[in-house]
Amino acid sequence: MRNLSQGRAVHLLDVENLMGAARPATRDVQTMMSHYRERVPNGGMDQYVAAVNHGAMVTVGLALVGIQLLVRSGPDGADRALGEVIRLDHLDARFERVVIGSGDGIFTELAGWLSGRGVMVVVVSRPDALNRRLRRTAGQVISLDLAA
């Protein structure tokens, strides 16, 4: 039986963290995604999941047409929604590589859990937003400098 995870990646995007703003404008999110796609290797079988708070749902949704959008408010709402996807959707069995688009330290434990299961963990973050523990846990870190 063929391993269905081979060559597949999932990109988990904490849009607020990648943007450095809780309610980014649609055009700014489109620009960020353009930078993201230039910097981060992706394949035809890759999947994308983005998470935001309810106040950013419309502007981000307009920018990320075709990408699964999760909405969760409250402290670390988007982070918690992405964390649930990692475990509940069995990403460790379905993907060879998990790309965490966030520098939040809340993802450190999940990144370690994925690595321990043989999944390549890539973290994409703005340089000023990357947690030190997450940097050490990731198999690879890609800088997303939106000012460049």
Image (tube, rainbow, N blue to C red):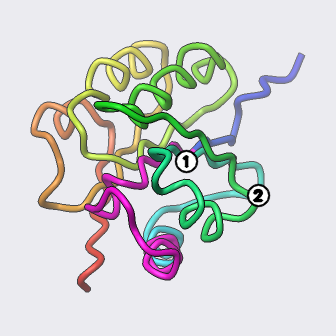
Residue at image position (50%, 82%) is: 27
Quadrant position of the C terminus in the picture: bottom left
Residue 105 among magenta residues: no
Residue type indicated by callout 1: Ala
Residue at image position (17%, 34%) is: 136
Q: Which mark is residue 50?
A: 1
Marked residue nearer the N-terminal end (2 or 1): 2
Q: Which mark is residue 42?
A: none
Residue at image position (63%, 49%) is: 48
Measured from the top left, where is residue 5 in percent x and y? 71, 29
Tally of marks: 2
Task: Sort mark 1 into few (<14), some (14-19) or many (20+) by Cα contacts within 10 Å.
Answer: many
Q: Which residue is mark 2?
A: 44
SS of the residue under disc 1: strand
Task: Sort mark 2 into few (<14), some (14-19) or many (20+) by Cα contacts within 10 Å.
Answer: few
Q: Which residues are magenta?
A: 11-33
**Closer to the eye: label 2 or 1:** 1
